[in-house]
Amino acid sequence: MSYEEYLDEVTTLIFEKYNLKDSLAVKLVMDAQDAEFFVRHDDDKKLRNIDQAHKDAKTIYESYAAKSQRR
């Protein structure tokens, strides 16, 4: 899948698996992208697959949850 499709997939998984509002899921993925979380995915298309998308969605969500608890 393309890089953009991959980001969409990760966003959708965060939305569906963790019951977040769509706008928050988009924000989390955009924040992760700004933090260069997806640089490897842009460079290596083998990382853009559904299994990796599930792992990345979990990592991004858990990072968000950890940050939310600190507030």
Image: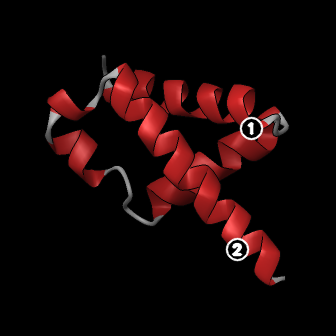
**What's the mark number on residue 67?**
2
Instruction: Estimate the x, y position of residue 28 in percent, counting from the top left.
Output: 64, 52
Instruction: Estimate the x, y position of residue 6 in percent, counting from the top left.
Output: 41, 27
Instruction: Estimate the x, y position of residue 42 in percent, counting from the top left.
Output: 24, 41
Q: Residue at x 69, y 30 (%)?
A: 17
Quadrant location of residue 52? top left
Q: Is residue 17 above or below residue 65?
A: above
Q: Secondary structure at mark 2?
A: helix
Q: Residue at x 63, y 51 (%)?
A: 61
Q: Amino acid at mark 1?
A: Tyr
Q: Is residue 23 left or right of residue 35?
A: right
The quadrant of the picture occupied by the C terminus is: bottom right
Q: Earlier in the sequence, mark 1 or mark 2?
A: 1
Dot 1 alpha-carbon crowd within 10 angstroms: few under 14, some 14 to 19, many 20 or more? some
Q: CA distance from mark 1 to mark 2?
A: 15 Å
Q: Is residue 28 left or right of residue 9?
A: right
Q: Which residue is mark 1?
A: 18
The quadrant of the picture occupied by the N terminus is: top left
